[in-house]
Image (cartoon, coloured by chain):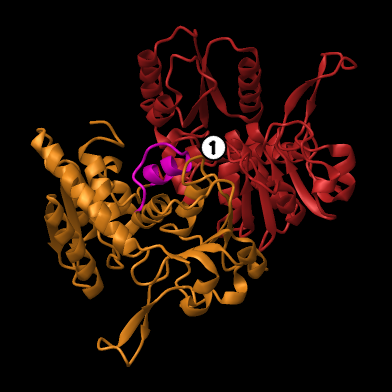
Chain colours: A orange, B red
């Protein structure tokens, strides 16, 4: 059984990106610049944003953190987005989610210039992904595709079952796995809350991608021997034995499922660590005009 | 076995749209106006465009046919698209495909204002479809959804298998059938040229949507008793016994498959007749600002 370590892969890609950025700048390229808009003072959001900013620093990428109180009006936030759209020094930017309830998230995301939408949430990038043309992929699906590619998991013609149809993971990864490409070309089934005979589908999977957010949902009797599992779940579960009072749980009951797998992503250390580096990779693609020529 | 007649349904919807448009105009609404750009003199394209223009006339919708020779430059065609984008009298327009090879189709479609993209091909509309928010749906998938709705085919939690992953039918209909909605909420599997055990999937289908363009591909031994089949194929097959020298063939071997079905769309008279009325419905939605508020 092979452990698909996103932590290891992230470290490898970070080293590559660091060299890539240094060479790009040495050859006269503009230093990449990522901006992050953070609204309010949600603890988890501040932690995520901190990860992003620090990784930029380590890899030679300029970053700007634009903080606003959670009392900012929608109008002012949209004006801030427009300001970043028009700032030629900024190659890509994101609006850290969630946003306060008085702000229309869709409106904010649709206002982002899709050429700077390194989170891949703008409908133009989503549509281009579905049309299988160059675009910014959202971080988690992009991270999953990189794991499959790096660990040389054969996806061509394989039976792939995706549990979950969310806009940020299930839907995009199901499209990417089904598209003509490598990784890709799998026969993909999307299961969700309305699916009736779930076990029949999971037992048929050569590759099972689980993005439900339900701790330890997938049990050993639901998968076949030799399956490859990508576990996207990362839920905080109370655990008094841990110093911080919780542990991170995946959507797969790892101890009993892992022995049946040919390969599996652990939690933590699997898909999670791939998200920030995927955002960074999008930022580098942006400055180089690899998706949208400059 | 129920025949899902798109021809009948199109007639019903045409009657509804005619009343809807008349009432809208009587209440002071602007008469809907569809423009069609036709490049070159491809016989099939001229036929399709003729259908669209004549249906507009019958239903009280203004139409404009903008013809160009196949020698038009890409630059001039893009300028024509911009002209229609900026013409306030035009609520929606399409560029009839295919285009001559020297023109970049993607560039032309992306230049269309998505708020006037009644063919639903612009990446913003595709992305919004994948995100399950209001958008213009492409004509064939929209037609299929209307057939399922009108004939009250239960899709909730059903096993739906889609054969084909094209941008104009397979991919969008697979997303719509999987999205949270009604019709929708099916467990959808997308099969394509790389799928290995196709028959295993088709035999599992409660609803089978076939969009391959391969005449009579689906045989009786590939489906289970009681299946609902949507046959999107419409291929001209030589037939000396017909006056015009050909007949239209679906992707399903109808004579042997239909008796096993609980419901099936015939070819011709099934999905085909739904496409023009779906385009017209999008045009009416455009003038009313139902998708993108005016």
The crowd level at tag 1 (other Cα within 10 Å; few <14, some 14-19, many 20+) is: some
Which one is nearer the viewer's eye here, B113 or A188? A188
Judge whether residue B206 is colored magenta. Answer: no
Q: Most extreme residue toward the bottom, as rendered?
A: A240
Judge whether residue A124 is colored magenta. Answer: yes
In this rendering, the answer to whether A78 lies above or below B171 is: below
In this rendering, the answer to whether A259 lies above or below A29 is: below
Coordinates of residue B12 in the picture (x, y in percent): 73, 40
Q: Residue at x 56, y 76 (%)?
A: A219
Chain letter belonging to callout 1 = B
Q: Identify residue for label 1.
A: B167
In this rendering, the answer to whether B206 lies above or below B162 is: below
State whether residue A104 appears in this view.
Answer: no
Query: In this image, B192 relative to A30: left or right?
Result: right
Q: Residue at x 47, y 34 (%)?
A: B117
Q: Residue at x 66, y 27 (%)?
A: B58
Coordinates of residue B208 in the picture (x, y in percent): 72, 48
Which one is nearer the viewer's eye here, A67 or A23? A23
Query: In this image, B263 relative to B276: left or right?
Result: right
State whether residue B242 appears in this view.
Answer: yes
Range of residues picked out in magenta: A123-138
Coordinates of residue B29 in the picture (x, y in percent): 49, 38
Which one is nearer the viewer's eye here, B185 or B195? B195
For label 1, the SS is loop
């Amino acid at each position: 059984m092979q452990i698909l370590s996103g932590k290891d892969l992230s470290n490898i890609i970070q080293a590559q990106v660091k060299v890539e950025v240094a060479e790009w700048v040495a050859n006269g390229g503009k230093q990449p610049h990522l901006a992050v808009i953070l609204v309010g003072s949600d603890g988890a959001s501040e932690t995520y944003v901190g990860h992003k900013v620090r990784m930029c620093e380590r890899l030679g990428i300029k970053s700007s953190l634009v903080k606003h109180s959670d009392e900012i009006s929608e109008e002012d936030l949209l004006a801030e987005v427009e300001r970043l759209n028009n700032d030629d020094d900024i190659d890509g930017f994101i609006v850290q989610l969630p946003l306060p309830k008085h702000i229309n998230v869709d409106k904010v995301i649709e206002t982002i210039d899709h050429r700077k939408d390194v989170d891949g949430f703008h409908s133009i990038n989503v549509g281009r992904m579905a049309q299988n043309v160059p675009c910014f992929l959202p971080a988690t699906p992009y991270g999953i595709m990189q794991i499959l590619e790096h660990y040389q998991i054969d996806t061509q013609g394989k039976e792939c079952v995706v549990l979950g149809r969310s806009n940020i993971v299930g839907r995009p990864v199901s499209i990417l796995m089904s598209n003509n490409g490598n990784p890709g070309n799998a026969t993909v089934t999307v299961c969700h809350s309305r699916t009736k005979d779930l076990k029949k589908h999971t037992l048929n999977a050569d590759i099972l991608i689980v993005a439900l957010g339900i701790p330890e949902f997938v049990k050993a009797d639901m998968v076949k021997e030799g399956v490859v599992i990508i576990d996207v779940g990362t839920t905080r579960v109370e655990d008094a034995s841990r110093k911080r009072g919780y542990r991170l749980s995946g959507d797969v009951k790892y101890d009993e499922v892992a022995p049946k797998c040919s390969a599996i992503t652990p939690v933590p250390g699997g898909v999670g660590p791939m998200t920030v580096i995927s955002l960074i990779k999008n930022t580098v693609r942006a400055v180089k005009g690899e998706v949208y020529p400059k």
